[in-house]
Image: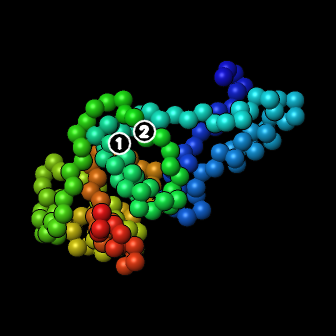
Amino acid sequence: GGPGSLFLAGDPAQSVVLGTDFRFEEVRSVGYFVAGNERRHLIPEKPRLVNTNFRSHSGILNCAGGILDLLFEYFPGSAKQLEKDRGLFKGARPGVFHNVEVQQLSALLKLQGVSAVVITHDESAARWRDILGHPLVYGIREAKGLEFKSVIILDFFAELPAPLQKPWRNL
């Protein structure tokens, strides 16, 4: 580090949108280009991995880690498997609701003081926005990179193509 240094960072697990996956090899090649032959030795052979998450608490990270464990067990090779993230702070596990009526969810979202964002598949966001009467319904691609305090993931597995639904239902 220091004046004139270049710091590059990325997350290889962030490949939500087709064609936007992060590859350390590409960053390293940019580093070689910028450094030139005389400073190429400054580019590390292996990236430094950081598994401390500064944005989410351990309750969310542990829940997400459990879902990823199932993903890797039942769909090997479907995503890059990294060491689990650790949170700096403790926090409650997220709630998981099954078979909630649309009217109940809509009523909850209309309560004073409830400021949740609803995330669903991109193709269904407008439909769910109308059904729920809630303006803060986003598709996965729309929400990528944004941060929200309270998030409801709606019908994520139900809206997968039929051949992909069965393995998740069996879990």
Quick one: 145 or 43, which is closer to the camera?
43
Percent from the top left, x then y, of residue 61? Answer: 35, 42
Image marks 1 and 2: residues in contact by CB distance under 8 Å: yes
Percent from the top left, x then y, of residue 144? Answer: 45, 55
In the visual, does 90 lie left or right of 76? Answer: left
Which residue is denoted by mark 1 in the rendering?
A: 61
**Quarter the C terminus occupies:** bottom left
Is residue 69 among what the camera can see?
yes
Which residue, as the protein is rendered here, is positioned at the far right?
A: 37
Residue sitting at x 55%, y 64%:
18
Which mark, residue 125?
none
Compare marks 1 and 2 and give the one earlier in the sequence.
1
Quick one: 98 or 135, which is closer to the camera?
98
Structural distance between the alpha carbons of marks 1 and 2:
7 Å
Residue sitting at x 31%, y 30%:
89
Quick one: 162 or 92, which is closer to the camera?
162
Residue sitting at x 50%, y 49%:
81
Residue sitting at x 57%, y 43%:
10
Is residue 106 among what the camera can see?
no
Which residue is denoted by mark 2 in the rendering?
A: 85
Q: Residues within 10 Å of mark 1 (few under 14, many from 20)?
A: many
- Relative height, residue 49 to residue 65 (above, below): above
SS at badge 2: loop
SS at badge 1: helix
**Quarter the N terminus occupies:** top right
Percent from the top left, x then y, of residue 48? Answer: 60, 33
Amino acid type at circle 2 is: Asp
Amino acid type at circle 1 is: Leu
